[in-house]
Amino acid sequence: MDNGDEVRQDRVVEARAKNISHNVRCTECGSQSIEDSQADIAILLRKLIRDEIRSGKNDKEIYKKLEEDFGETVLYTPKFDIQTAAIWLTPLTLTGGAVLIWAFKRYRRKNNVHIMALDLVRGVPLTPKEKEAMLELLTPPSTRWWGKWLPR
């Protein structure tokens, strides 16, 4: 019965160790996890992880120890703090700003003040064909180099 418990315990340790090892970057290779790497440091880290599991530590404690010993770059999933937030959110913010500027310019082009004034004077809204003709007449030609190729 003890032999069966030991085998089961070894399987649990092995499964946890592999799971942790897949999430830890090899400090020598950099591009491989320590589970996939055959570098000396990776072999030592796998042994360290198994020893820590056998001593009763949970996964978070093991990750924390590895991070303290080797730095945050050893983990494939870095902590989310102000620095990583800036790295992840800057492209999203810039893209969102560009979309807002594009939408505002498009809105302004469709709601040209001259057409709105003409609607008020006539008392009747313009038909889509009249609106397009008015926009063509009232929109100044583009002086930008890309204005020649973009549709109005």
Image (cartoon, rainbow, N blue to C red):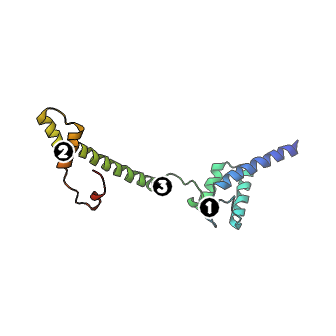
Q: Which residue is mark 3?
A: 84
Crowding at label 2, few (<14), some or many (≥20) Cα neighbours within 10 Å? some
Instruction: Identify the secondary structure beneath mark 1.
Output: helix
Residue found at x 20% / y 56%: 141
Q: Quadrant of the N terminus?
A: top right
Q: Earlier in the sequence, mark 2 or mark 3?
A: 3
Front label number (2 vs 3): 2
Q: Which residue occupies the foreground of this view, 92 or 139?
A: 139
Given residues 34 and 72, the one toward you in this image is 34
Q: Which mark is residue 134?
A: 2
Type of residue at label 3?
A: Thr
Residue 105 in the image, given as x and y percentages of width and height: 27, 48
Residue type at the position of mark 1: Asp
Element at badge 2?
Answer: helix
Query: Is residue 125 shown left or right of residue 24?
Result: left
Compared across the picture, whether 13 is left or right of 145 comes to: right
**Residue 21's x, y, as percent?**
67, 55
Closest to the observer: 73 or 100?
Answer: 100
Residue under label 1: 69
Mark pair 2, 3: CA separation = 50 Å
Which residue is pictured at 17% across the width and 41% down the height? 115
How far is mark 1 from mark 2, CA to CA? 70 Å
- Residue 143: image location, x then y, percent: 22, 60
> What is the tally of numbered marks visible in this picture?
3
Closest to the observer: 55 or 105? 105
Q: Residues within 10 Å of mark 3 (few under 14, many from 20)?
A: few
Q: Are marks 2 and 3 in contact (CB under 8 Å)?
A: no
For label 3, the SS is: helix
Left or right: 79, with 12 as reference point: left
Q: How far apart are labels 3 and 1 at the CA level?
A: 21 Å
